[in-house]
Amino acid sequence: MRTIQFREAIAEAMSEEMRRDERIFLMGEEVAEYNGAYKASKGMLEEFGAKRVIDTPIAELGFTGIGVGAAMNGLRPIIEFMTFNFSMVAIDQIISNAAKMHQMSAGQFTIPIVFRGPTASAGQLGATHSQAFESWYANCPGLKVVVPSNVYDAKGLLKAAIRDENPVIFMESEQMYGDKGEVPEGDFVLPIGKADVKRAGTDVTIVSFGKIMKVVFAAADELAKEGISCEVIDLRTVRPIDYDTVIESVKKTNRLVCVEEAWPLGSISTEISYMVQKRAFDYLDAPIIRITTSDTPAAYAPTLMEAFLPNPAKVIKAVREVLYVNK
């Protein structure tokens, strides 16, 4: 095993798949000459040339539509958004065309396309550049939505996404590109739609995904000092959701806390809570608690962002509450 950065894992996954299949190409703003806004495509222009690593104008609607059309005609595009906040300009192409084309064409077209880039907050970026879109896209049939939390998962899941015959939304974080982790030397692919039990435990199940897993691990470490054993589950994919892994864990621990960076209404936590009460209600020894962002646009001030976002203290409080531990 070797240690690389998250951005390097993304670049490796794309490059390895492009070497394997000449139909794959990367397109987006600053992906070529600048090596990517976050250097996640470093060296790819030099290796693959300007016909397969393509800089675009600031025109998400246009290059997303080109990508969908290319996928309909036998190519396998990777479309990079500098941030998924900018994907709102292109959401009609993603939802109305990429996600629905296979059904609307009665199976005549597959759309093997990956839309990737960072989602959610990344410091002081203000209300319009700090939105989390996982639950937005997960609401749409025809899309798969992948949200890796670490370097190993990022590489294995991105390779799976590129090989998929259906549209995949692959969501990263600006705050994770410099993260380091171990990755195997050889080719490996992780299955889309399979959650991962990152830490076994007995007292409470904590479910999350993406960069908020760091918050969960920090909370679990502190709770362990109190003798509280947390089973930590990383969903990795929020469409499809691996309900079975979550439910089997809840049947063991009898308690559930869901944590995510999203507004509460229509969140992934809401869906998980519904499915657990439907399939494992009799196993619950306490009401499910979900921790989301505040139900307001993100602020700019650091103090307000701290109050807005999930943090370890909020998770610890929730775990103590479902365990009926007062501190």
Image: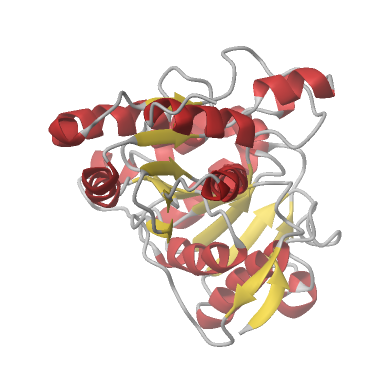
* Horizontal arrangement in the rendering, residue 98 relative to residue 260 (left or right): left
| Residue 83 visible within the image | yes
* Horizontal arrangement in the rendering, residue 280 relative to residue 84 (left or right): left
The mark total stands at 0
Rendered residue at 80%/28% (across/down): 125
Q: Is residue 21 above or below residue 325?
A: below
Rendered residue at 66%/46% (across/down): 173
Please tell me in which quadrant of the rendered image residue 41 appears: bottom right
The percent coordinates of residue 267 (x first, y second) are 43, 26
* Horizontal arrangement in the rendering, residue 128 relative to residue 255 (left or right): right
Rendered residue at 26%/27% (across/down): 274
Say which quadrant the C terminus sits in: top right
| Residue 96 visible within the image | no
Say which quadrant the N terminus sits in: bottom right
Q: Is residue 323 above or below residue 65?
A: above
* Horizontal arrangement in the rendering, residue 59 relative to residue 295 (left or right): right
The percent coordinates of residue 48 (x first, y second) are 70, 76
Colour scheme of the rendered structure: secondary structure
Q: Is residue 174 above or below residue 1?
A: above
The percent coordinates of residue 256 (x first, y second) are 35, 35
The percent coordinates of residue 80 (x first, y second) are 64, 50
Q: Which sits in the foreground, 120 or 161?
A: 120
Rendered residue at 54%/75% (across/down): 17
Q: Is residue 16 above or below residue 166?
A: below
Q: Which sits in the foreground, 27 or 222?
A: 222
